[in-house]
């Protein structure tokens, strides 16, 4: 009973993309300390917007790996460009790094399917 590379290549990007979106969503919790009343709802929505976008991408990428690869890799590049190049390395490692990893894994999944036939 060996390791089934096809199953790993299929499930790993999907599982990690869910984990990444949940990780990003945690950062939205800071609105509860900064806002009150109805302002919390608007601020929470704005902070969760990237998570909603990536969640929609995940739904599409579930069947179309290349979409997941392109969007998650683009999200990593966009984040680095958005925050600039003068931040601590940890900013890039913990946000752009996982997004790039998920993008590469979706690309590997797509390549595995293409190779299989």
Image (cartoon, rainbow, N blue to C red):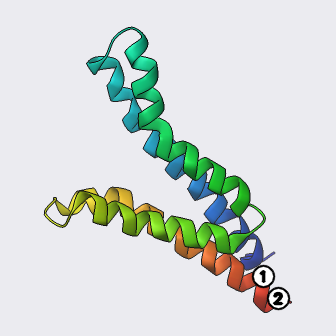
Residue 65 on image: x %, y %: 69, 71
Q: In this image, 9 relative to 22: left or right? A: right
Residue 117 on image: x %, y %: 86, 90
Q: Residues within 10 Å of mark 1 (few under 14, many from 20)?
A: some
Q: In this image, 38 relative to 19: left or right? A: left
Residue positioned most to the left: 86
- Circles 2 and 1 in contact, beta carbons < 8 Å: yes
Q: Is residue 57 above or below residue 48?
A: below
Residue positioned most to the top: 37
Residue 22 on image: x %, y %: 52, 42
Residue 6 on image: x %, y %: 76, 77
Q: Nearer the viewer, residue 116 or 41?
A: 41
Q: Nearer the viewer, residue 78 or 10?
A: 78
| Residue designated by label 2 | 116
| Residue designated by label 1 | 113
Residue under the point 62% across and 72% down: 106
């Amino acid at each position: 009973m060996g390791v089934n590379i096809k199953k790993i290549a299929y499930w790993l990007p999907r599982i990690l993309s869910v984990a990444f979106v949940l990780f990003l969503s945690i950062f939205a919790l800071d609105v509860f300390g900064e806002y009150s009343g109805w302002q919390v709802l608007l601020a929470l929505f704005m902070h969760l917007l990237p998570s909603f976008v990536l969640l929609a991408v995940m739904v599409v990428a579930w069947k179309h790996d290349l979409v997941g690869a392109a969007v998650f890799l683009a999200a990593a590049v966009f984040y680095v460009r958005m925050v600039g190049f003068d931040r601590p390395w940890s900013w890039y490692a913990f946000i752009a790094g996982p997004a790039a990893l998920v993008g590469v894994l979706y690309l590997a999944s797509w390549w595995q399917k293409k190779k299989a036939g």
